[in-house]
Image (tube, rainbow, N blue to C red):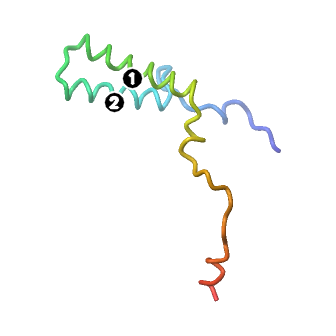
Amino acid sequence: MKRYPKFLKTLPEFYGLSFYEIGALIVGLYLAMILKLSPLYTLLTSAICIGVLKVIKRNFDLKAYFLPTRKDLDLSEFKRRTK
């Protein structure tokens, strides 16, 4: 297997926040707008959303959770259609 440099494996960051953390920040801001929170609570909500996302990413394997449990692929139905 070919090894790639580290910069090709890492996700891009913007002001130190990854793509997922920016998404959590936006969710926190929208949640604060919907609930009409004060600026202090808005910052707190955004920080909590980012923190929860980091805990979930560190402690749970979301890719394995969302992938289907079946690993086999049945091509017999596909073969019948192409004839």
Instruction: Name the amino acid type tagged 1.
Output: Cys
Tell me the residue at 19%/14% (across/down).
38
Q: Residue 83: where, in percent of width, then height?
A: 64, 89
Q: Which mark is residue 7?
A: none
Q: Residue 26: where, in percent of width, then height?
A: 34, 29
Residue placed under numbered mark 1 in the picture = 49
Tell me the residue at 67%/77% (across/down).
76
How crowded pointer 2 is (Cα within 10 Å; few <14, some 14-19, many 20+) is rated as some
How crowded pointer 1 is (Cα within 10 Å; few <14, some 14-19, many 20+) is rated as many
For the residues labelled 2 and 1, say whether their Cβ atoms are less than 8 Å apart.
yes
Name which of mark 2 and mark 1 comes first in the sequence. 2
User: Mark 2 and mark 1: span between their CA atoms?
Assistant: 7 Å
Tell me the residue at 40%/32% (across/down).
23
Instruction: Name the amino acid type tagged 2.
Output: Val
Q: Which mark is residue 27?
A: 2
Q: Residue furthest bottom?
A: 83
Q: Secondary structure at mark 1?
A: helix
Tell me the residue at 63%/84% (across/down).
80
Left-right relation of 50 to 32? right
Q: Quadrant of residue 45?
A: top left
Task: Answer above or below: position of 69 versus 35.
Answer: below
Q: Quadrant of residue 22?
A: top left
Q: Residue 78: where, in percent of width, then height?
A: 62, 77
Question: Which of the two residues, 4 or 79, is positioned nearer the viewer here?
Answer: 79
Q: Quadrant of residue 50?
A: top left
Task: Answer above or below: position of 77 versus 27.
Answer: below
Left-right relation of 73 to 57? right
Q: Quadrant of the N terminus?
A: top right
